[in-house]
Amino acid sequence: MDPREKKKREERSKKTKELLDKAFDRVIGSKLEEIAKEREQARVSQDEESYRLMLAQDREKATSKKRRNLTQEEMDMAAKTGLSGQVVALMMNKDKGGGDASSDSDDAGDRKSDKRKRSKKSRKDDRRKKKKRKKKKKRSKKRRYDDSSDSYSDDSSSDSDEYSSSDDDEERRRKKKKKKRRQ
């Protein structure tokens, strides 16, 4: 085969390959764009649906809350002012001094929260007292240990009486200092 003919064949095959690639890209490219659009639309519709569901849940939460029954006067005032009936009822009850049945239930809720606060406070105090007792026991055990190593006394009741005065406390401190120096 002649090298010129060979070169011409290669050029033709290159051109046909380029033409086929372009055609393939046009066909496949348009299909890929369509698929991408469909995916985007599906994602957007899914986002919108989830948003609608969230709004519906929030709406359900808001409507399921217990609401106070409004009197005719409160409803009229709400219509005149454009405020929510619940807001008007709340404002009117403050003016009256809260003598309504709903305010009594609110007071009961306040009492419950006060009881909770008190019980939490008392639990805290109990924990503090318990910690103090533990510390005292620990100290007394240390004292007994220190005393037993110094004087070998078996009388535990005399130990508690022995440390009641300030002179004995000073003596005990001196003994501890001596022990530390020896070590």
Image: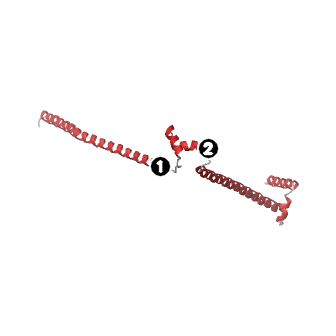
| Frontmost residue, 78 versus 30 | 78
**Residue 86, label in figure:** none
Marks 1/2: CA distance?
Answer: 27 Å
| Frontmost residue, 20 versus 113 | 113
1 or 2: mark nearer the eye: 2
* Outermost residue, top side: 4
Secondary structure, mark 2, is helix
Q: At which x and y percent is residue 36?
A: 30, 42
Q: What residue is pinned by disc 2?
A: 96
Question: Residue 146 vs residue 113: left or right?
Answer: right
Vertical relation: 130 (above or below) 5: below
Q: Considering the image in quadrants, where does the N terminus appear? A: top left
How does the figure colour the protein chain or chains? secondary structure
Q: Amino acid at mark 1?
A: Thr
The residue positioned 88% from the left and 54% from the top of the image is 167
Question: Residue 12 vs residue 40: left or right?
Answer: left
Q: At which x and y percent is residue 38?
A: 30, 43
Q: Amino acid at mark 2?
A: Lys
| Frontmost residue, 160 versus 132 | 132
**Residue 63, label in figure:** 1
Q: Residues within 10 Å of mark 1 (few under 14, many from 20)?
A: few
The residue positioned 21% from the left and 37% from the top of the image is 22
